Each structure stands twice: as structure tokens, then as C-alpha cells.
Amino acid sequence: MKVLVFGAAGFVGRRLVAELTRAQVAVVGADVETARDSVSSPIHAIDVSERQAVASLVAEIRPDVIVNLAYATGDALEADLDRSTRINVNGHLHVLDAARDCGVARVVYSSSIAAYGTDQSVYGDRQITESDSCPLEAHGTTYGAMKAFNDFIARRVRAESAVETCGVRLSIVFGPGRRHGFTAWTSHMLEPARGDAIHIPVAPDDPMSLVSAADAARLLALAVRSPTSLPPILNSGGYRVTARALVEEIAKIEPRLHFHFSETPAAPIFVNNVSGALAEHALGFRLQPLPTALRAEMAGQ
Ligand SMILES: NC(=O)c1ccc[n+]([C@@H]2O[C@H](COP(=O)([O-])OP(=O)(O)OC[C@H]3O[C@@H](n4cnc5c(N)ncnc54)[C@H](O)[C@@H]3O)[C@@H](O)[C@H]2O)c1
């Protein structure tokens, strides 16, 4: 099996490339940024907003599966909506169209729990499943609305072509090495300069839905390699935990770390009660226990 990964140099992409390589899958990486130290194998320089470039690369590589993780996130997304639409919306479409035109069997892409919005009360106090959706006016972020639109477009391509699309709605991903996104603080809390108090820009007692970077990569790799057909959308599920409970867990592992919370929370945390039952049913995927996942990420595994 040959897999082409767009966004291969990113936080999740690097881990996915490593995970697939460990499973003996032939991986070709592509990213607009190719000069990062931690990327082990060479990757193709490509901007997914350039339709012809995406088409040519897919025609040249002829992968069995494409993974699209290329995205503009966080403040960069909001700061230049024209550019981020070209990457996040047009780029997504370019990948799907190239897959269809080249007979690629499957496209797995990173959706997000942001597609369900920022407000759990839209759903009530229950687990959100893949058949739920967020009314457009209830979206708290452009990011979430774009993810929902990505899912809409992918479903259309899936219905109208032979490409099997699967959007993996990841919870907030924690692990060292993340540089972009509204929730990059979940990375910074694991990799502070010793002695500094770590700023947590959310309210201490609001629950969130979190998944470790290792588990996110493992789930994406399971979707890539699945011998059976995939549903159009799969939630990762996540640990439902408050920031206060999270830092208490971290302090058990590394008691020298100190944290302080925002008095006026500055980062969205999205919905917090997301079911991972379908991913368990379809792929046998289960999250590691939270202390195990935290320990592994803090050890840089
Ligand atoms: N990190 C999280 O908490 C989280 C949660 C849910 C979903 N996701 C989704 O997972 C995906 C990967 O996120 P990440 O955290 O690894 O982000 P990241 O910013 O580290 O990775 C994105 C990659 O896309 C590349 N990229 C950006 N513009 C590009 C372009 N025009 N052409 C080609 N490549 C381009 C970047 O260089 C980067 O390497 C995104 O779709 C993101 O929305 C992430």
C-alpha cells in the first residue's frame, strides 16, 4: 500500500508518517513547509491551494490512499481568511478531485470536533455522535464552520464518485511540538521551560474533550489501513476533563511544573462530550488511559 500524506510536516502529520512507516506502509509526504528538523524522510514541497500542483503530484505518485492534514488553523486562519479559505476549502477540494481523477480508493482527512461547534449546550448533556451536526449560526469559530463544510464536500464526492472519504473528527490533540492552532496551549503545558509558570488560557473548571497526539496518529493510521469500508465521519472520542483536572494529572508526573489559569478565558475549547463508540466499533480503536497517554507524550514518545 502506498499513502500520500498532505500536511506531513505538521504536528499530527509527523506522527502519522512515523506510525505508518512503523507499520511497513510506503509513505510519501507533502507539505508547503519542508525544512523542519524533525521530519525524518524527504517530503514534496507543495501548496494544496494550487490545484494543478496537487493534481500533478497525485498523478505522479498514484497512491492507494491519500491523507489530507494540510490546514491553516488558529489566529493565522482568522487573520487572512482569503488565504485560509484557499488552503482549507479549495485545497481540500483539490485533494478530493485529484483522488477522483486518479482513481484513488480512499481519502482520510482531519476533520475536528470543532465541526460540532464551541457550545455543548446545543446538544445537551449527552454524548455527541457522528450523526449530530451544528447549526451554522451556532458555530463559535470560522475554523469549525470550515470543518463542517469540508465534511459536507467530502460526503458529496463520496456519494458521486468511487472515492471513499473519511473525515476523522479529532478532539483537541495534546502532545509536545505543536506550533499552530487555538489550543496549542495543550502542547505548551507539556514542554515548558523549567521554573516558568505555564499559562492556561481557559477557565479551570470547564470540561474539554482531549486526545493524545499518539492516539490521534494511531486512529488515522487505522483508518488508512482498514481492510473494510469506513463511515464518512469518525469521531476520535476523547478524555472529558477540565483544565484543572488535567494539570493535576500532569503535576503527578512532573511536580515541578506550575500553572495559572486565565481570568478571562481566551481560547475556544469546543464541545466536550464526544462519543468514540463508532471508531471503536469500526476500527477497534480505544484511547489509552489518560495518565499513560500524558506520561508517554511528556516523555516525547
Ligand atoms: N492539533 C489539534 O488539536 C487538532 C484537533 C482537531 C483537528 N486537527 C486537524 O488536524 C490537522 C493537522 O493539524 P496539526 O495540529 O498537525 O496542525 P499543523 O499546523 O501542525 O499541521 C498542518 C500542516 O499543514 C501544512 N500546510 C499549511 N498550509 C499548507 C498548504 N497551503 N499546502 C500544503 N501544506 C500546508 C503546514 O505546513 C503544516 O505542516 C488539521 O486539519 C487540523 O485542523 C488538529
Image (cartoon, rainbow, N blue to C red):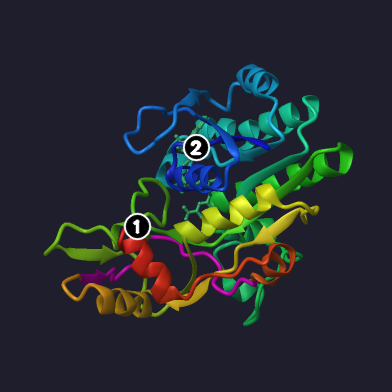
> In the image, is residue 231 above or below residue 28?
below
Q: Is residue 63 left or right of residue 171?
A: right
Q: Residue furthest left?
A: 195
Q: Residues within 10 Å of mark 2 (few under 14, many from 20)?
A: many
Question: Toward which corner of the image does residue 196 lie, by quadrant?
Answer: bottom left
Find numbered disc 2 in the image and state the secondary structure of the residue it sits on.
Answer: loop
- The magenta stretch is 258-275
Q: From the viewer's perspective, is 34 left or right of 7?
A: left
Q: Position of residue 157 (x, y in %)?
A: 80, 39
Q: Quadrant of residue 39?
A: top left
Identify the residue at image location x=66%, y=74%: 123
Q: Which residue is mark 1?
A: 187
Residue at image coords 35%, 39%: 38
Q: Which residue is more in the foreground, 186 or 41?
A: 41
In the picture, which quadrant includes the N terminus? Answer: top right
Q: CA distance from mark 1 to mark 2?
A: 18 Å
The amino acid at mark 2 is Ala
Query: Which residue is disc 2 drawn over?
Result: 8
The picture places residue 246, in percent across and down from the top left corner, at: 36, 75
Name the spot of residue 188 as percent of width and height, x first: 29, 57
Residue 32 badge: none
